[in-house]
Image: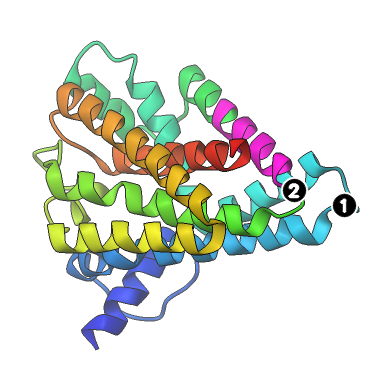
Amino acid sequence: MRAVDAAAAALAFLTRIPVRRALGPDDVARGAVLFPVVGAGVGALSGVAALLLYPSVPALAAAGVAVAVELVVTGALHVDALADTADAAGAPTRERALEIMRDSRIGSFGAAVLMTDLLIRAAAIAGLAAAPVGALVAAGALSRAASLPLAAALPYARAEGGPGSVLSGRVRWASALAGVAIGLAVAVAVTGKDGAWAAVGAAGTALLLGLVFRGWLGGVTGDALGAVTELSGTVALLVLVAT
């Protein structure tokens, strides 16, 4: 029963797919090991959407639909986190940065970073238009795995609770490393050695951002972890289209 709750929590936390179970933070933390599986599923849905449209429509249009499918399925969870984090980057103090992250409004910097990220994603998917499913499955798995070591290693940046506190300080290293192994295995299984290079790109992105968040915020927030997921996925797609 706990395994079922963990799987349901992973699905409910990362998507807007309704799960009819009473779940708590501990279920989400236990389900973190399955985040790459959920990410792979989201990638498969968006990849199939692009594949069904191409070549009937231009590659960029099919890629745009693939991006839209992911946004709908995830409720734009990670792009919202990226925008909030980008807006907070201009704050003069750590305290002000944390306040900005909690503001539901998107500022000019957040909007610019968000638009740039989505444009790069769409362009990368367009470059993979003839075979997008494997790449999007790999990127989906790797991006959801990338934030797990940061959740295990870094403290929650706020003294009070928040959405990110269901992961930060709760995810065990064993689960984080198992999740990374699953993400890598999925990526290599569907894209071969290119998946291993994509994993290097995703890991490097997560490591760099983790160091930034540690020095800037003293830890991570839900928005910080979401930004890691979004950007590591974009980097993974860029690596895959380049290899």
Answer above or below: position of 192 versus 7.
Answer: above
Question: Residue 174, position in %: x, y?
Answer: 15, 63
Circle 2: residue type: Ala
The dominant secondary structure in magenta is helix
Q: Which residue is mark 1?
A: 55
Chain-order first, disc 2 or disc 1: 1
- Asked whether disc 2 touches disc 1, contact meaning CB atoms under 8 Å apart, the reply is yes
The residue depicted at 67 percent of the width and 51 percent of the height is 66
Disc 1 residue crowd, few under 14, some 14–19, many 20+, Cα 10 Å: few
Pick out the residue farthest to the bottom.
Answer: 1
* Observer able to see residue 50: yes
Q: Which residues are magenta?
A: 116-129
Question: Residue 166, position in %: x, y?
Answer: 21, 56
The one nearer the camera, 110 or 147, is 147
The residue depicted at 26 percent of the width and 82 percent of the height is 3
Is 55 on the left or on the right of 113, as rendered? right
Residue 201 falls in image quadrant: top left
For the rendered model, the colour scheme is rainbow
Circle 1: residue type: Pro
Is residue 47 a member of the stretch shown in magenta?
no
Is residue 128 a member of the stretch shown in magenta?
yes
Disc 2 residue crowd, few under 14, some 14–19, many 20+, Cα 10 Å: many
Q: Which quadrant is the N terminus positioned in?
A: bottom left
Q: Which residue is mark 2?
A: 129
Residue 98 falls in image quadrant: top left
